[in-house]
Image (spheres, grey):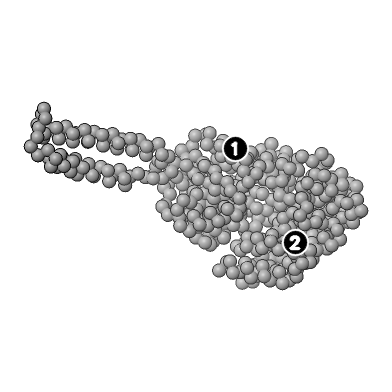
Amino acid sequence: MKSSYLGLHSSIPGVILAFSARLRCIYPHKSVGEPMEEKMNKLAKMITIVTAGVMCISALSACGSGSSGSAGESNEILLWSQTTGPDAENAKKTFDAYNATNPKYKVKLVTMKKDTFNAKLATAGRSGKNVPDLAWVASEEVSSWQSQGLLVDWGSSLDGSKVTEDAYVPSAWKAGQVDGKQYGIPGIMGTWVMYYNKDLVDEYVPGAMDDGVATFDEIEKAGAAAKADGVYSYANSWGFQNYDNLYLQMGGEWLNSDGKISVNNDTSKKVFEEFQKLYEDGYMLPNGEDATKNFLNGKLIFMPEGTWSLTNVQKATFNWGETFVPQWDASHLIQCSGADQFVIIKAAKQRSDEKLKGMVDLMTWLQSNQLEMLKSGANPSSVAMLDNEEYAKMPQSFLLKDDKAREAVNVITTPGLSYVNAEIDTRNWDMIEGKADIAQTMNEIQQVAEQKMK
């Protein structure tokens, strides 16, 4: 708008002179009623008035186009998110509530599916054009986006603000760091946990959940006891989540001595051998079966699922509970978790300090206003929410209320692990069903991850 306005303004004298000259050529000696020179002067004045009016309208349009602060800078914070379903609905309610406080920079939330989100962010980020101000990403994705040069660290914009390390759960805050710089500010914590049918536990493995922990040994015993009744004891509804947890529980390390991703090893083989055993013995829900549906129908005892599945689980007509993922060793708890992060996407034009402050104001407000987003099962990342009475009554709160549970939480941030997990999701059932050799498949997954990290 600024460049077209200047072009129009600079051309006014030329337009008037050219028009006057054209009149003289057409009517060199004629005069009707009044001298031609006077007519031309009046006409020139009219052109000037009309042009000025057009300029005023253009200026008013620019004022109403959503720009403020620095020239051409939007007065809204564009936020891209890969949340869907109930999570997206609760997020929208949260940001609508923020906008209702009438901040200088309101939030525009745009949600999309994960694959679309990744593709659009990669394309826009490389050009620096049409990028969001903030992206809401998984904790394990921060290092990947940063390594591609798409992120800007929060840096000095946090100076003097309440967005500090001690305002968040330590593991959640650390998840936003890369090379000592804060690239992410924690949002909420989505965790792969386990729901269980208390009535079926009492029937097939009484006392197994007295300590609040289900081991793989107990899952196998439950499966053996329930098999004749057509009841399963375990579900593999999201491959990489189950793999990540059991891999660490078995003592696996994501990085080798050179600091590079390493999953082609004996520990990975042991993980899938355990899954194979559960499947071959008939204790694992078959591939393609809906875990939540079977759980609600009383055909599944233990269901590893995300905290975000709470909305569906609450429909159960039986006694149910929520606890840690299945453990390899009950005396050594490990519970993988995510800690979503708000990251700043690099733009071709640097954002003003004023807008960055508006983004920090949003992060500050979220510290004590996450309750709506927690209703679909997530845990808060900010310590301000831990004493909230309504949150404390939610079933997922056990992960942060109990010291033992909080110590068990392991937020995944390993660079390159997102590539491994994507491959695990695609290939895990082939290994479980014996259609693909475990060692060979893990070697291929290792190679894919290494290639994508170059």
Q: Amino acid at mark 1?
A: Lys
**x%, y% of residue 141?**
59, 57
Horizontal relation, residue 37 to residue 182: left or right: left
Kindly identify which residue carries mark 1.
93
1 vs 2, front mark: 2
Horizontal relation, residue 332 to residue 201: left or right: left
Residue 259 location, quadrant? bottom right
User: Residue reaching furthest top?
Assistant: 33
Q: As displayed, is residue 143 above or below residue 24?
A: below
Kindly identify which residue carries mark 2.
429
Residue 55 location, quadrant? top left
**x%, y% of residue 262?**
66, 69
User: Residue reaching furthest left?
Assistant: 29
Secondary structure at badge 2 equals helix
**x%, y% of residue 248?**
72, 62
- Residue placed at 61% from the left, 57% from the top? 140
Mark 1 touches mark 2? (CB < 8 Å): no
- Residue placed at 79% from the left, 66% from the top? 434
Q: Is residue 189 visible?
A: yes
Q: Amino acid at mark 2?
A: Trp
**x%, y% of residue 43?**
18, 34
